[in-house]
Amino acid sequence: MAGNTYGTLFKLTTFGESHGKAIGGIIDGCPAGLELDFEAIQKELERRKPGQSKIVTQRKEPDTVDFLSGIFEGTTTGTPIGFEIVNTNQKSKDYSHIKDTYRPSHADYTYDQKYGTRDYRGGGRSSARETASRVVAGAIAKQFLKDIKIHSYTSSVGELEMDIPYKDLDFSKIDSNDVRCPDDAFAKAFIDRIKEIRKEGDTIGGVITCVIQNVPVGLGEPVFDKLHAELGKAMLSINAVKGFEYGSGFEGAKMKGSDHNDIFNADGSTKTNLSGGVQGGISNGMDIYFKVAFKPVATIMQKQETIDANGNVVEMQGKGRHDPCVVPRAVPIVDAMAALVIADFMLRDKSIKL
């Protein structure tokens, strides 16, 4: 299986399966001399871990990271940083009923057809549990980025959409509630909706908005390595993501150029920021902001028609512990992937002082 590495200079390779002994990764290219805040890294993992509230999966995992290499006396050495997170609460028997059955909208069928085998216990490598390794690497990237600030938050759940511009929000309130929304009223509405859906044995999707501030001018290349293209690739690599838009996004297609153009100030900043902080594939110094759309979790506690490995039409129903909405736990994953992209481009652009 290829495609387990992300990045050009700041690289992350992940390994492990949902119900295996452990998951983990190797970070290659992290500069030497970075003094790490291990509590901050663990805090990011706790934001993503299962069992943290009543609106997420009740699988209980401490998600404690153990660093194996690349760090000496709390400081990076410049050599590969190896780490692992031991799985402690697997319940593989919860998946025995799908050993020869393909779950609708999961990777079961495509994995079996491509590789001739699959790990049916929680999806194996296709499980979102793999993203814990991304969060570790992203937390280190955040510390490398120093003054660059990344804030992701839940901006919609199902048909409920927060219509408050990000500049009017208090990002310090993102973690003040279980759904990670910085507005109290919308947070309550989102949580209530997720609870309703869970009682129905169903799931629901949502959208995460991400804002990256204090990005220097000049990150990104103008052809195939556009900054927004790499951000899009990073976000679309996250499980359950169905869409990505930055700046004005699809709404910009409804506008006239005279309304959409960002007029310059004398210092090179712009009066508006419909470009989303990226012009010609290169950061322009304004805030970078984008949205990431997540589909409803595919495993539902309702009976569905599907097929088995022999092509027979069968009926199945989800069992075990699953998220009714993936969005609250995906917020730190979006943060992490954004940090990996920006860190990689910072290292690639030698004209920018680190």
Image: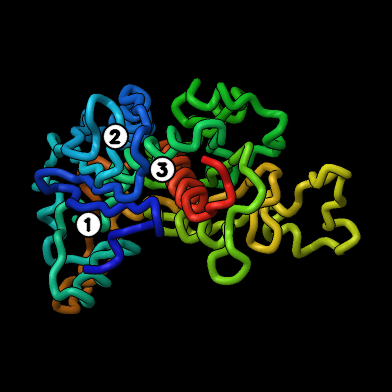
Q: Residue at x 51, y 48 (%)?
A: 346
Asked if labels 2 and 1 touch by Cβ distance under 8 angstroms, the answer is no
Q: Tell me residue 221's x, y (percent).
A: 59, 63
Q: Residue furthest right?
A: 258
Asked if labels 2 and 3 touch by Cβ distance under 8 angstroms, the answer is no
Q: Secondary structure at mark 2?
A: loop
Q: Nearer the viewer, residue 307 or 284?
A: 284
- Image disc number at residue 125: 1
Q: Tell me residue 279's x, y (percent).
A: 70, 58
Sequence order check, earlier mark of 3 and 2: 2
> Marks 3 and 1, how far apart in space?
17 Å
- The nearer-to-camera label among 1 and 2 is 1
> Marks 3 and 2, how far apart in space?
13 Å
Kind of residue indicated by mark 3: Ile
Q: Is residue 317 above or below residue 309?
A: above
Q: Secondary structure at mark 1?
A: helix
Q: Which residue is mark 2?
A: 50
- Image disc number at residue 333: 3
Q: Secondary structure at mark 3?
A: helix
Viewer can see residue 325: no
> Marks 1 and 2, how far apart in space?
17 Å
